[in-house]
Each structure stands twice: as C-alpha cells, then as structure tokens.
Amino acid sequence: MNDWKKYKLGEIAELRKEQVASNGVEQPYIGLEHIEQQSLRLNGIGSSDSVVSNKFKFYEGDILYGRLRPYFRKVYNPKFEGVCSTEIFVIKNKKNVDKDFLFYLVATEEFTNISNSGSSGTHMPRADWRQLVKSEWNIPDVPTQKEIAQILSSLDDKIELNLQMNQTLEAIAQAIFKEWFVDFNFPVAPQPPKGGESYKSTLGDLEASISVARVLNSANKYLYPQLKEKAKEMRNNPTPCEKILWNELQNKKLGYKFRRQHVIDKFIVDFFCIEKSLIIEVDGEIHNNQIERDEERDDILRGLGCYIIRFKNEEVIDNLSSVLKKILTFLASRTSSSPHIEDQEATPWTAP
C-alpha cells in the first residue's frame, strides 16, 4: 500500500452530462428497471423511441450508476453506446485512473454505503454527486490498476460463462421436452435394428439440431446492432490472409457453407460453418499480446457448443494446403449435422 495515493473522487472521475432529446433516432435505452440489483448486469434493454423525456448519452466504457435508492447498488459498465434515464449517473474516468478499475471501485460496497449515507430524500432517496466527489479513496498507480481490473474482469467473465451454460442447459431441456412431449417425436423407432441404432441416430440428430439452434440464437441482443454493422465493415475490408482463406471456403468449395465475419454472442468470428458448428480464426501479430483474452473468448464460444480452429497468418500464406487439410479433416470427423437450418440468420439471444 506504500505506492498507493489518496485521491478525492472528484480528482479521478466526473459526470458526463450530455443530454439527448427525443429526435426520432432509435438508440439502445437503459432505465433503472433494466439494471439488476447487486449483480452488475442488465436484465433487459429498451428503445429510446419509447421514452419522450430527456435522456443522458453514454459511451462504451462509461459507468452507469443508479442514483435513485443507491442502496440497490445498480451499477453497469456498458460495452456499447446509447442513452439512459436521467436517474442514472453517467460517470467517466479522468486520465489518472483506469476506466475498468474505476468501475470496480464504484461497484464496491463501501462506495454504496457512502452514496447511501449522503443521499437526499426520505421516501425516494437519491445519491448526491456533490457529496460523492468529496469522498477519499486509496488508488494505486495505473499499471497496478489495470492488473486489478483484469483479474476482476476475468472473474466476471467466468461468472457470465457459467450463467450462459446454465441457460443453455435449460434451453436444451425445454427443446427436448417440446420435441418428445408436445410434438411427440420420441427418439425411439419400432423394432430398432442391432440394439438401438435407430434410437441413437434420432437422438443424435436432435442433439445436433439443438446445438446449431443454440448458436444461431446466441447473438447478444444488446450489442447486436453495433456488431452487425461492424461485421459488415469487416467483410468489406478483409485482411490479406482472410481474403486468401475465404477464396477457398466460399461457395461450398470444401463441401460445406461457411460465413465470414459472423456474430456469435458478443463476438465477431472470422469464419463459421453453422452445419458443423466450426469457427475458424486467422490470427495476426496482435493476438500474440492477447493470448489470455483469446482463451477466455474461446471458452465462452465452446460453452455455446462451437468448435474452434486457429491459424496464424504465416500458416495461411506459407502452407495453405496444410490449413485446408486440417479443416477438411475436422469436417469429415463431425458426422452429425443439421443442413436444413444452414441458411438461417443469427438472431439476438434472449434468455429462456
């Protein structure tokens, strides 16, 4: 703690007070009702068109803090830009503090207690920013801030992955229940030959259909509009190595349909074969400096039922035949498929 210094909140953070009036332009809208209590997550999102009153503008990396009844601890760190209720503080970092570190500081129980103690109003208490800026905090240097924020962010990602896996299991259970007990498509044929081969085949097709449908419906509904536009931009401006590999994948040259720059959950993957749930990534030099980040990303995608093959730029340029052979080997090894839904579009994910 010797290298930590004491700062007032006003020295490391400030409010963004950019008001936006209703102008007919639709944007993601976050009200207090959309931020969960205590969990640092959203439970939904609205549209700016549905709110006629003035709103605050927020940007990716800002901190949204519910000032009404601050003891609810409604805090969120958006990965997209939009507008929010004026009952929400839009907090941005100053140059001497990392924005992710500031988010976790604002999310602490200590910050909530200070905010609550200085709130005004009896029945509808509101946090007072003029009081908050006077609060004092011990802050380390920026490199240490980044290390702390990275550790906490990694834990949050793992929690999010576990939640997604639970939701996936619930979706599978609901799909099987509907298939068997609503549509009455039982996975048992009369007199199955050779000890149940027909049963195995039918159940395998059902599992494959569920797996593919799960990925198709995985696009994060909060980020999807921005991700869709970004994916379109990336398709129009591919890297040289992406262009080389796409020339070999397009038009079912390997026997299967691939998409490029496809949205899955909150990510854009380079190439995706829906029928085989296969993601292919072509990594440039920047990926040498984000190995841990890529691993966490891959964990989330695998949790959605995807398979991932990564190639370096050099492999695509110097040994394209070996790259294609590896892809073909994987495709041949995946016997289950669901070709009847290969042309469906990805849709924003909604929790069941």
Image: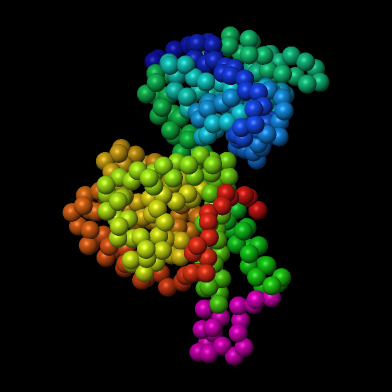
Point 52% across, 20% down: residue: 92
Residue at the extreme right: 123
Point 43% across, 16% down: residue: 95
User: Which percent across, then down, holds residue 132?
Assistant: 61, 13
Give, as a single range, the part of the protein colored magenta. 184-201
Position of 69 compared to 175: left or right? Answer: right
Q: On screen, 285 above or below 218?
A: above
Q: On screen, 250 above or below 221?
A: below
Nearer to the camera, 63 or 242: 242
Residue at the extreme left: 318
Helix, strand or loop: magenta stretch: loop
Nearer to the camera, 51 or 337: 51
User: Which percent across, then down, holds residue 268?
Assistant: 44, 46
User: Which percent across, then down, holds residue 6?
Assistant: 48, 11
- Which quarter of the image is occupied by the N terminus? top left
Position of 302 compared to 238: left or right? Answer: right
Nearer to the camera, 234 or 274: 234
User: Which percent across, then down, holds residue 183?
Assistant: 69, 72
